[in-house]
Image (tube, rainbow, N blue to C red):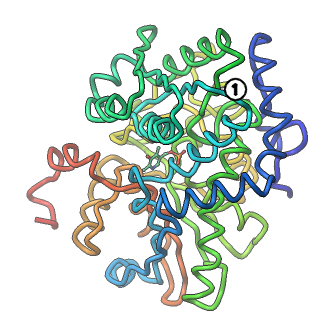
Amino acid sequence: MSYEIDPRGYYGEYGGAYIPEMLHANIEELRSQYQEIMADPSFQKEYNTLLRNYVGRPSPLYLAPRLSAKHGGKIYLKREDLNHTGAHKINNTIGQILVAKRLHKTRIIAETGAGQHGVATATVCALMNLECVVYMGSTDIERQAPNVARMKMLGAKVRPATSGSQTLKDATNEAIRDWINNPHDTHYIIGSVVGPHPYPDMVAKFQAIISQETKQQLLEQEGRENPDYLLACVGGGSNAAGLVYHYLDQNDVKIILAEAAGKGVHSGHSAATSILGSLGIIHGSKTLLMQDKDGQIIEPYSISAGLDYPGIGPLLAHLISSKRAKVYSATDQEALEAAIELSRYEGIIPALETAHALAVLPHLNLKTDEIVVLNLSGRGDKDLDTYIDNIDTRSNFQ
Ligand SMILES: *Cc1c(COP(=O)(O)O)cnc(C)c1O
């Protein structure tokens, strides 16, 4: 079984580039050049220097002693929460802005749901002095006011998408429309391993720094590169793709993914795409997505804004359907409790997205000497209001 992308841009039956004719030239320009650009030594040097001196990499690999005592095994946390801007998303936006510069683009567009990708994009545009326009659904602009303020502070223009449900998919449509109208000077930075080929492959390769560092750090700390388990939460799938990238062919390493069950997988308020989804086309990619019988997208729901994407990246769909990866889902309540647990046990407040991965730990039934690397994809500062509003004072964690 191959987990590499094929020359046509597919992982198994998932992927490809299902795009309107008017986007063909933009996508083809990127597709024909991204590999050469990324392999260029001057690109590598600039990318790695920024990751070190601007983002703060390598991120630590931390053996969490009290969490391990609670759940068994040796649980290591890959600390992407310590990156500049507080999550893994900056690994990708740094990479893509350097690609955009080499394609001589002067203007950047992006779409954002919760605003995290918008902030990571606005950050690198400020760094490189490029114009930045972020599309965001009007509903999300209201819900995510602090991130809207951050983007504005960084000099980005935030444009509301007012059609449909006024959320992420509407913002995506607006961004695509913009790109069609501005093909020459504009690069579209997609925020996860989703979208038409070559985006899923390009984003996975920028996030692969996570597994590259993990191998070396685990070798130093444990005398072996391979853990028994890798565990990550999945929205579109970019932090998971980065964590597993250099381990895909190591069959002794089990891959565990955590999806958002919302109020329960079958409650009608869920984002568990791998269970509720079926094959279709979203955002230019053939993959698993939540759709009704007419192919209309079903709005996903999760307490965590970063996980309520109605699709899943084609690499992840392939890993799941080929049984290379196993999926568990965690409800809002389970994620909240796991977030409180990590805060009280280790002094680390995780992002709500990451908390879904933490909530899966009890399901692994770890043996004493088994090693888990859990991708701590982001920090919880952005979620404090949600945590405070939801902490049940009668819980065990008073
Ligand atoms: C955006 C986000 C996610 C989900 O996106 P992926 O592409 O699936 O990684 C997970 N964790 C955090 C902290 C995020 O900001």
Q: Is residue 174 above or below residue 379?
A: above
Q: Quadrant of the N terminus?
A: bottom right
Depth check: give the residue in front, 90 or 222. 90
User: Mark 1 = which residue?
Assistant: 280
* Residue drawn where x is 44% and y is 77% of the image: 62
Depth check: give the residue in front, 177 or 104. 104
Position in image of residue 145 (x %, y %): 26, 29
Position in image of residue 37 (x %, y %): 79, 45
* Quarter of the figure with residue 212: bottom right
Q: Quadrant of the C terminus?
A: bottom left
Depth check: give the residue in front, 246 or 318. 246
Position in image of residue 394 (x %, y %): 9, 59
Name which residue type carries label 1.
Answer: Gly
* Residue drawn where x is 49% and y is 19% of the image: 171
- Left/right of residue 259 with respect to residue 44 in the rendered view: left
Depth check: give the residue in front, 330 or 375. 375
- Left/right of residue 152 with respect to residue 76 in the rendered view: left
* Residue drawn where x is 41% and y is 69% of the image: 362
Q: Is residue 239 visible?
A: yes
- Left/right of residue 321 with respect to residue 161 in the rendered view: right
Q: Residues within 10 Å of mark 1 (few under 14, many from 20)?
A: some
Position in image of residue 121 (x %, y %): 49, 37
Q: Is residue 158 above or below residue 235?
A: above
- Left/right of residue 183 with respect to residue 384 in the rendered view: right
Mark 1 CB lies closer than 8 A to ligand 1: no
Q: Is residue 334 visible?
A: no
SS at badge 1: strand
